[in-house]
Image (cartoon, rainbow, N blue to C red):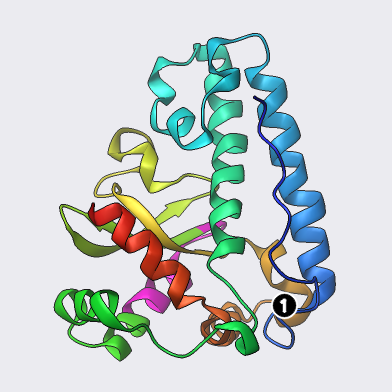
Amino acid sequence: MPLTLPNLPYALNALEPHIDARTMEIHSQKHHAAYVTNANNALAGTPWADKAPEEIIASLAALPEDKRAAVRNNAGGHVNHALFWSVMAPPAHGGGGAPAGALAEAIAKAFGSFDSFKAQFADAAVKRFGSGWAWLVVKNKALAIVSTANQDNPLMGEAVAGSGVSGTPVLGLDVWEHAYYLTYQNRRADYIAAWWGVVHWAEVARRFQAAMG
């Protein structure tokens, strides 16, 4: 079936003051909606029109060449944003704080400590030139931090997303300017610092467990 725009799991203003309601409205109802529409248009009439979006972006090389760029950008944008909305929550409903259990242990093992992880992840997000994403991925049964340009996703693999970029994303941060400019203007670092206050670690942990098998 065609890709569909997911409903946000919270109200547009639920992430304030970390992310403002107007940004959430434009981001989810305009930008994400456009990715869904454009991806469906590109996939229409192909055998890929009924595939799961994650399967589609992981198999870009199999798509017709004249469809590939549009699908990469728009199906990629859909997958990225669907994950992004799900890994955030209002502080009153689980957003912020720190991970626990197996996820916390894996973060400490991979990065030394939770604070060290946050610093390394923020560094990847700040240094992503132009538009793109920072990701926490499961790769070879361990956690790693990668970043991608535009709407690329680690599921696309190194051949598409770049050297060293692969794995199953369990946490993603959108650093396109449309994700933060109304409140933070050019202060991307301030946006990243505020975003930690709405990360939904229970959902990240669920994705981590699924990726670990």
- Where is residue 83 drawn, in percent x and y? 53, 56
Per the rendered image, the range of residues in magenta is 120-132
Q: Residue at x 72, y 30 (%)?
A: 38
Residue 95 in the figure: left or right of residue 145: right
Q: Residue at x 72, y 44 (%)?
A: 5
Residue 22 in the figure: left or right of residue 63: right
Q: Residue at x 20, y 80 (%)?
A: 105
Taking the magenta stretch, the answer to whether it contains residue 126 is yes
The foreground one among 78 and 50 is 50
Q: Is residue 53 above or below residue 1?
A: below
- The residue pinned by badge 1 equals 185
- Where is residue 157 drawn, in percent x and y? 32, 39
- Where is residue 167 drawn, in percent x and y? 29, 49
Residue 31 in the figure: left or right of residue 132: right
- Where is residue 186 drawn, in percent x and y? 66, 77
Q: Is residue 26 above or below residue 124?
A: above
Write down the quadrant of residue 118 in the picture.
bottom left
Q: Is residue 153 above or below residue 117?
A: above
Majority SS type along the magenta span: helix
Q: Amino acid at mark 1?
A: Gln
- Quadrant that contains the N terminus: top right
Secondary structure found at label 1: loop
Taking the magenta stretch, the answer to whether it contains residue 48 is no
Q: Residue at x 78, y 69 (%)?
A: 23
Write down the quadrant of residue 73 in the picture.
top right
Residue 79 in the figure: left or right of residue 23: left
The foreground one among 118 and 7 is 7
